[in-house]
Image: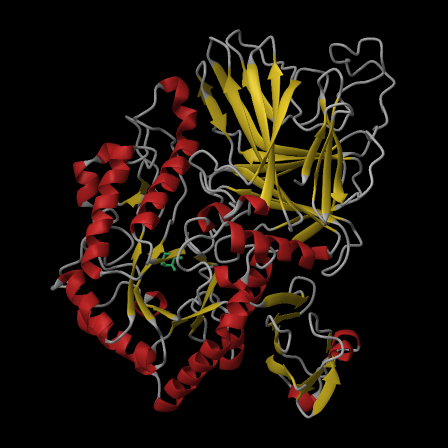
Amino acid sequence: MSITYDQNTGQIHLFNDQISYIMQVQTSGLLLHSYFGKRIVLLSGPLPYPVRDSGDFSPRPVGYENTRFTLDSALQEIPGGGNGDYRTPCFEVTYADGTKATDLRFVGATIRAGKPKLNKLPATYVKKPEEADTIEVSMCDNFRHLEITLQYTIFKDLPVITRSIIYKNNSNRVMTLGKAYSFAVDLPDDNFELLQLPGAWAREKQIVRTPLVPGDHVLESRRGASSVFQQPFLALVRPSTTEDTGELYASHFVYSGSFRLEVAVDHYHQARLTGGINPVDFSWELKPDTEFQTPEMVTVYTDQGLHGMSKAFYRLYGDHLVRGEYQYRDRPVVFNSWETLTFNFNEQRLVSLAAQAKAVGAEVFVVDDGWFGHRDSDSSSLGDWSADRQKLPSGIKSLATKIHALNMGFGLWFEPEMVSPDSELYRAHPDWAIAIPGVSPVQGRHQLVLDFSRADVRTHIMNAMSQIIDAGQLDFIKWDMNRNIASIYSASLPPERQMETLHRYILGLYAFLEELTSKYPNVLFENCSGGGGRFDAGMAYYMPQSWASDDTDAWERTKIQYGTSLLFPPVMIDAHLSESPNQQVGRITDFRTRVAVAGSANLGLMLELDKKTPEELSKIKAVVEAYKKKRHMIQFGNFYRLISPFTSDYGAWEFVDETRRHVLVYLVQALNQPSKPLLTIKLTGLIPGAHYRVANRVWYGAELMQYGLYLNEELDHDFASIDLAIDCVD
Ligand code: DGJ
């Protein structure tokens, strides 16, 4: 068992070979945080944290009246408000008398092998109880009868602690949760930089690292979706931390709705990390004897730099979050119709494009937007999930039969959460869209959001989708979501509970996805939201791969995929080889560079195959063939970032297979330049004493990792990009 609770000293210790997480139950019942970091093997007893306050501005908690102790500077596990701690609280409850102050004291702790499922929420899981241990620490306010259970799980061989909190009303009057975060970690110093992944449409997950200064730092989405603008993630990184070395704490929220992550640096330069569901536009009525469980927060500690962090996330998500048939299966090369055809196609055009896609090696043909209702632009038909009879007079079944006859998988695009005002569905059920009664609904991309918190709405969409999936015997579904919620209102809730809508929407979405993915276990689901607008760990529980961005330009994608790779391995990222000039930015990029970038994740194609010469087609075919030979290593091998495109004009990365004998190195540059400065790439992950061939010379692995690879004429002069296959020759 890797969790101990010593009832004599009050010390609780979660540990594995890599990390220790230690908390302290005071004799008064207060629960203090002692330590989170590298494993402490020998512990002599409780870890006392110095009392910092000497003035009277911060009141003492009950039981500490004549001491200097105050919660305002103590490290805590579940900081609340109204008890002398004026820093960011982890929760806020309004009691029936309108007041908020809460005084939580320890009740007990239960340790068990394994990891319990979260209530109706996606979360990391174990297949066998020996893979993790869990402790549930119960805290109670005896006057308010609020009970809070803190769930912590430590995985056996990962530097990760997962947290969820259950808020329970044991009183006989209603309480209202105004804020119900999933975790708090109090760190004793602020000598960190803040690393985050902000972005925008077509520019997702950009790496930004800034010094941490005193005050409150808030990263959030208020949109009802995690969004393109910010990933529910942050890391506190020591200033000296690099890709390979150094300490950091990284938290990632397993949730797809509005979130907030906060770092508060206090008056003693301590850093408090908190986060969970965004309290903006959130409240939750806790009736007597009911409880509310928060989504899960994953926190990694490593002293092995950003690579150590990514490795932990890859293993956690690869082995303990992604589920289903495709978890460990090589992902097919998909041809997607969007950039080639947009809304302009008919059955004949699709079938002939599919035949061309098959000829160059694509394994699945996906018809993107435009196949349903009368959808000739983005202004109609969402919600009418049956074939557009103008374009597809014989329906989906006929098209699917023809695609399947080519010996290809067949897939379709859906945007199930949406409805167009110009649709049969909206005309029949205008009240199913999220809109305030009597107020004109707010539109985005000419569409409204269906109230997925409602079971009747979900049932209708499930039935409509199922009919199509069954008719087309679909192998692949692209699930898109192109606008955020506004004018929040749900017809299923009374006025005082309207602000439950956003979270209930996400719970409804998760319920839908659970049902759909269980009903169709053989379908490969691609998560998309106008690109990476909901590419988060919550969605990854249901859909094993995500469309990272609507930007398919190779240089832009170099950055987007580099940023995405902090959290998600290449097998969870979809990237398509597209035309040049690029549709989003107009940049002209050579074929080899576009292949290098798209071929560094799950390769797909979005090409105008009918306009290609036979030579061009055979080049594409050769690329797809080559990708298939190395895809297992790309999708499931070891991935290393080598040179960051956020701090240089280059992006470089590397794949190493499980045997460490086969290596792929890619380098892309923003713009080619004359008289380039000398560039060296130091490889990583090789066997130091093994021999590897690079061009005409054989090197030791140690040399390639330390001396590095000088990119000179011998390798490739005036390169726009470099792709090297390096193999061990021993
Ligand atoms: C946004 C997606 O990100 C695109 O790939 C495409 O599917 C369009 N929607 C279709 O409307």
How far across and down, in percent of the image, does residue 469 sit?
24, 55
The residue positioned 45% from the left and 48% from the top of the image is: 541
How far across and down, in percent of the image, does residue 437 sit?
29, 26
The residue positioned 63% from the left and 83% from the top of the image is: 727
Towards the viewer: 219 or 21: 21
Tell me the colour scheme of the image. secondary structure
Quadrant position of residue 693: bottom right
How far across and down, in percent of the image, does residue 305 sit?
72, 56
Q: Is residue 90 left or right of residue 226?
A: right
Q: Is residue 474 left or right of residue 694?
A: left
Instruction: Note whether residue 212 is visible.
Output: no
Q: Is residue 445 left or right of residue 30?
A: left
Asked if 95 appears above or below 378 in the picture, the reply is: above
Quadrant position of residue 105: top right
Asked if 475 appears above or below 529 in the picture, the reply is: below
- Residue at the left extreme, as displayed: 394
Asked if 608 appears above or below 505 in the picture, the reply is: below
Q: Is residue 369 left or right of residue 391?
A: right
How far across and down, in percent of the image, does residue 135 sit?
61, 33
Quadrant in which the C terminus appears: bottom right
Which corner quadrant of the figure contains ligand 1?
A: bottom left
Tally the numbered discs: 0
Asked if 706 appears above or below 164 in the picture, the reply is: below
Instruction: Note whether residue 659 is visible.
Output: yes
Quadrant in which the N terminus appears: top right
